[in-house]
Amino acid sequence: ATYIEIFRGLPALLTIIIIGLGLPIALGVNIPPRNWGPGILALAMVAAAYMAETIRAGIEAVPRGQMEAARSLGMSHSKAMIWIVLPQAFRLMIPPLTNEFILLLKDTSLVSAIGVTVTTKELTRWGRDGVINSANATPLVVAGLVYLALTIPMTRIVARIEKRAAQSK
């Protein structure tokens, strides 16, 4: 609960800066690979907190009677969770988990705050550098279009999955 509260409460950008710049300065700890490892770790920690909360809420959304019915049929707690509760919870978790994945994809743009090398630019940094070098906004527009090309199909797929899950009820 403490982990979830901390990483859901801190802005993702601050987490990236603390892990990417603060840890090496304060503790002398470098997270390998040095170019992009800190960004991946920070985003993973933030996303894990949100996903854990989504999974907890999904499991709690399944009526208690489902577990009680499975247990009364002689199933162990773990079997009841695996075969009865989790499949129902997973249906409820699909939309928020995929939304979190889309947000995680877009949050990769925040990694530019900790700096990258010339050979390891992330998309937003590439667009920003292009604007600086050419005095033209086209690179940022292209970066935005790439993000849209990645996120729009994902939202469409999620909508289909939700529709199919609603029909199967």
Image (cartoon, rainbow, N blue to C red):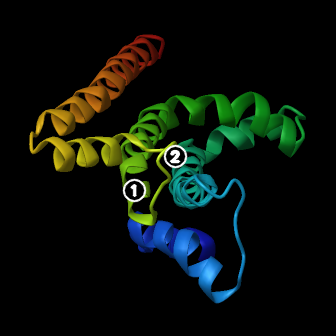
Q: Dot 1: what SS?
A: helix
Amino acid of disc 2 = Ala
Q: In the drawing, does residue 160 fall left or right of residue 35?
A: left
- Residue occupying image coordinates x 17% and y 45%: 131
Give neighbour class at mark 1: few <14, some 14-19, many 20+ (Cα, 10 Å).
many
Confirm whether residue 83 shows in the render. yes
- Find residue 60 and report its horizontal and vertical position in percent: 57, 51
Image-quadrant location for residue 146: top left
Measure the C-alpha gap from mark 2 to mark 1: 38 Å
- Residue occupying image coordinates x 50% and y 52%: 117
Pick the front one: 112 or 54: 112
Image-quadrant location for residue 71: top right
Q: Dot 2: what SS?
A: helix
Amino acid of disc 1 = Ser
Q: In the drawing, does residue 64 fall left or right of residue 47?
A: right
- Residue occupying image coordinates x 55% and y 80%: 22
- Find residue 98 and report its horizontal and vertical position in percent: 45, 34
- Find residue 30 and report its horizontal and vertical position in percent: 70, 69
Q: In the drawing, does residue 7 fall left or right of residue 107?
A: right
107 above or below 162?
Answer: below
- Residue under numbered circle 1: 112
- Find residue 70 and report its horizontal and vertical position in percent: 77, 34
Give neighbour class at mark 2: few <14, some 14-19, many 20+ (Cα, 10 Å).
some
- Residue occupying image coordinates x 43% and y 48%: 108
Pick the front one: 133 or 152: 133
- Residue under numbered circle 2: 61
